[in-house]
Amino acid sequence: MSLRSSRDIPSLEITPPEIYRERRLFMQGMGVMVAGTALGITSDAQAGAKLADVHRSPYTLNEEKTPYKAVTTYNNFYEFGPGKSDPAERAGSLKTRPWTVKVEGEAGKPGEYDIDSLLKLAPLEERVYRLRCVEGWSMVIPWIGFPLSELIRRAAPTSRAKYVEFVTLDDPGQMPGQRSDILDWPYVEGLRMDEAMHPLAILAVGLYGEVLPNQNGAPVRLVVPWKYGFKSAKSIVRIRFVEKQPLTAWMRAAPREYGFYSNVNPHVDHPRWSQAKERRIGEFLKRDTLMFNGYGAQVAQLYRGMDLQTFF
């Protein structure tokens, strides 16, 4: 199946380059002490900082961005607790250095990347994406990252690799929410291989031109903008190529409520609430939920012929 390039994105969805100002240099690693203090990152998370350019990406939206404060204080990250403020209040315990991501499973070139090596896999880009949460709220966030497909190509998946599984750090000492039994830890998510290879799927290492705050999934997280936010696994330590569809954390916890695909779909309600409307953080009135979160022109072909009521 061929993938659409940036030329296939409707022109109204592409931010004109002339409105951009030159982006500041992105702080690779965990930043210098000043950046760490501003972001609430501990000193343990700051060694080995490097500077690199952040490139403007054509895969970006010309929409008003959600304020930085809201993006970094209103979060779902159950590893730190179920409350929206829990991650910002409790994620300071997470040490993001040293950090390694193991790439394993059905791959010709498995490996292990420390965070610096991971950041050098591909040029970093800013991509302004919509984020739609399954509870009905949404944001617009300027992520910094690179295509997930860049890592996948280097791993050389075998013909047996049909899915990609993502596993979050499992450490209750650093992640106090894991002391509860709300989920079966570690947090596991997954994508079908063609979804993972789509150019819109990225590994994010920052937002708003700065290093990724702990509460937003530091030091590296998945971002899949046409799916509900819980699909975008945070604080990833393992990426595994597998033959069978992964049993994800929310599927295991509540299979009637959370399916594997979890595409944003206003026509498929959650068993306990409608998905037809959403409330953008900072706005009073609700707006219509867009099919595939507004990315249908780019991703609908991935699901051609599928019953999205059954494969929700």
Image: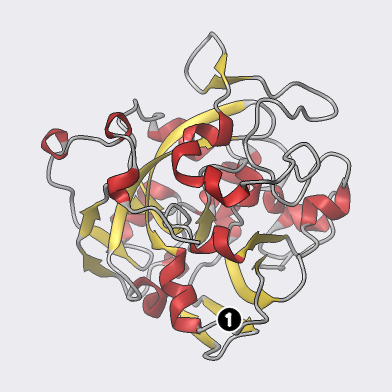
Left-right relation of 1 to 48: right
For the image, the number of numbered tags is: 1
Residue with the mark numbered 1? 102
Q: Position of residue 66 (x, y in %)?
A: 41, 29
Q: Position of residue 238 (x, y in %)?
A: 62, 74
Q: Position of residue 234 (x, y in %)?
A: 59, 57
Left-right relation of 34 to 246: left
Q: Position of residue 7 (x, y in %)?
A: 27, 47
Q: Is residue 181 visible?
A: no
Residue pictured at 29% horizontal, 56% vertical: 125
Quarter in which the C terminus is drawn: top right
The type of residue carrying mark 1 is: Lys
Left-right relation of 145 to 16: right
Residue placed most toward the observer, 10 or 224 = 10
Taking the view exactly as shown, the residue that stands out farthest to the front is 305
Taking the view exactly as shown, the residue that stands out farthest to the bottom is 108
